[in-house]
Amino acid sequence: MLCYCILDFGWNWDDHLPLVEFAYNTSYQTSVVVAPYKVLYGRPCRLPLCWAEPKEHVTLRPELIEETTEKIKDIQERLKEIQSHQKRYADLKRREVEFNTGDSVFLKVTARRGVTRFGVKGTLAPRYIGPFEITERIGLVVYRLNLLAQLGHVHNVFHVSMLKKYILDPSHVVQYVHVPIQEDVSYEE
């Protein structure tokens, strides 16, 4: 972020670092729906006219105020460009998926180092298990599943990114082999 903002200032980042920090802290963030400064202090931040210490007496010239205001606006425009670039990149990997109550889905089994899951080790471990029925839609992207009794220690609420739609195939028969799974999602052979 700093490198992207400093291009216009001739790579003189020592003088402009406080302005970049101020512009970031006072710009609108979609994740918290307000500026970070307002989240921390409960009030909007005023425009800094001088970065001097409180004990120092500094005479403010109109040129200094105008220059500082212009630099902050330039930095905020750069930050908007950075955020839109990051959003475009994130949207390429994002998928809009919606399920209904009663649909069958597969549950993604995330691999952890050193943890053996569901009877297969290493690279042959399954990526998805199931199918499981969706019993309730809790939020826009959160669903409650009807899990098996042997998965009773696993919380049954999952984000939509952990689910994959199961298309019913009459020839598909799912057989479960009972594997005693421990609390840390491991088992003994």
Image (spheres, rainbow, N blue to C red):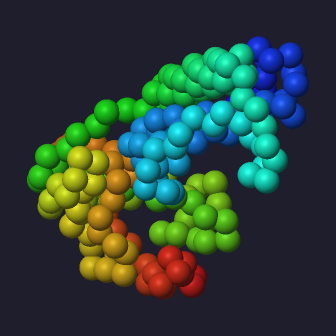
Q: Looking at the image, which is closer to me, 153 or 20?
A: 20
Question: Is residue 126 something that shows in the picture?
Answer: no
Residue 4 horizontal side relative to residue 45, left or right: right
Residue at the image position 38 percent from the left and 43 percent from the top:
33
Residue at the image position 15 percent from the left and 59 percent from the top:
136
In the picture, which quadrant includes the N terminus? top right
Number of numbered callouts drawn:
0
Residue at the image position 46 percent from the left and 44 percent from the top:
44
Q: Measured from the top left, where is residue 91 in percent x and y?
A: 46, 27
In the picture, which quadrant includes the C terminus? bottom right
Residue 173 horizontal side relative to residue 27, left or right: left
Q: Looking at the image, which is closer to me, 92 or 116?
A: 92
Residue 58 horizontal side relative to residue 164, left or right: right
Q: Is residue 149 above or below residue 111?
A: below
Q: Measured from the top left, where is residue 126 in percent x and y?
A: 49, 56
Q: Is residue 14 above or below residue 57?
A: above
Q: Looking at the image, which is closer to me, 124 or 137?
A: 137
Q: Measured from the top left, where is residue 49 in percent x and y?
A: 66, 33
Residue at the image position 46 percent from the left and 35 percent from the top:
28
Quarter of the image for residue 52 reads top right
Q: Is residue 42 above or below residue 97?
A: below
Q: Looking at the image, which is closer to me, 89 or 58?
A: 58
Q: Measured from the top left, where is residue 92 in percent x and y?
A: 48, 25
Question: Is residue 37 something that shows in the picture?
Answer: yes
